[in-house]
Image (cartoon, grey):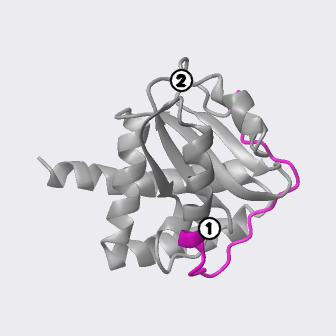
């Protein structure tokens, strides 16, 4: 079963905070040092806090490129020393962490194989929303509605965004053909 760790954290969206990019940069500097044995690419700011003007849960989403999940498994214990808690959520496509706990989250970290479909899709979605104001407005509206409807159910909140994400990625893919 691929349940998101529930803890006690509820879905609380806040207005965009201009400090989110600098918070990401500070965390990237730490992760660059800790993850150096496993990194094969960049460390990216993803999720809604990476999209200027987007309301979001105040949790910085970070995706780091690794060679493979097996090769990066030792990173799990290394990251524990920097307050990242590992959860086997979607363990077939990424190593997923939250910091400092499931109940109080400031950061999510996704170790994802470089050039995997997950890697490609996360960056494509982020960039599509960053570059299309109409999509950004539509996405913000959807997020607000889902946050009200699923305040106590993170998995349902995430699942509710899936059709929109798939539509954006599908149209992005079609435009590249």
Name the side, left or right, on which 145 lies relative to 105.
left
Q: Main secondary structure of the magenta part?
A: loop
Q: How many marks?
A: 2
Residue 62 location in percent, x, y?
56, 52
Q: Is residue 157 visible?
A: yes
Q: Residue furthest left?
A: 177
Of label 2 and label 1, which has the lower sequence position? 1
Q: CA distance from mark 2 to mark 1?
A: 26 Å
* Of 58 and 65, the residue lying toward us: 65
Q: Is residue 8 magenta?
A: yes
Q: Is residue 74 above or below residue 107?
A: above
Please say whether residue 88 is visible from this viewpoint. Answer: no
Residue 157 included in the magenta stretch of the image = no
- In the figure, residue 147 lies in which quadrant? bottom right
Q: Please, what secondary structure does the residue beneath circle 2 have?
A: loop
Where in the figure is residue 71, as x and y percent of width and height? 53, 19
Residue 34, image x, y percentages? 62, 40
In the picture of the structure, the residue carrying the numbered disc 1 is: 23
Q: Would you name the residue on which mark 2 appears?
A: 69
* Point 50% across, 58% down: residue: 45
Q: Nearer the viewer, residue 47 or 151?
A: 47
In the rendered image of this protein, does residue 171 appear above or below residue 85? below
Task: Name the spot of residue 59 as percent of width and height, x first.
Answer: 67, 62
Q: Using the image, tell me which numbered label, if any, was put on residue 175.
A: none
Magenta residues (range): 1-23
Of residue 119 and residue 5, the one placed in the foreground of this image is 119
Task: Please name the residue shown 23% across and 48% down the image.
Answer: 173
Give the residue displayed 61% in from the left and 70% down from the top.
56
Q: Secondary structure at mark 1?
A: helix
């Amino acid at each position: 079963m691929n349940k998101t760790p529930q803890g006690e954290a509820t879905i609380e969206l806040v207005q965009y905070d201009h400090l989110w990019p600098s918070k990401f940069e500070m965390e990237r500097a730490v992760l660059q040092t800790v993850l150096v044995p496993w990194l094969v690419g960049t460390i990216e700011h993803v999720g809604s806090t990476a999209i200027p003007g987007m309301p979001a849960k105040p949790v910085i989403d970070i995706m780091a490129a690794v060679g493979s999940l097996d090769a990066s498994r030792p990173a799990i214990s290394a990251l524990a020393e920097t307050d990242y808690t590992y959860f086997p959520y979607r363990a077939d496509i990424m190593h997923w962490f939250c910091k400092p706990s499931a109940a109080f989250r400031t950061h999510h970290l996704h170790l994802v194989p470089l050039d995997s479909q997950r890697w490609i899709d996360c960056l494509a979605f982020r960039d599509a929303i960053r570059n299309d104001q109409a999509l950004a407005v539509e996405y913000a509206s959807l997020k607000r509605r889902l946050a009200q409807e699923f305040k106590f159910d993170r998995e349902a909140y995430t699942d509710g965004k899936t059709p929109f994400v798939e539509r954006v990625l599908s149209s992005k893919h079609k435009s590249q053909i």
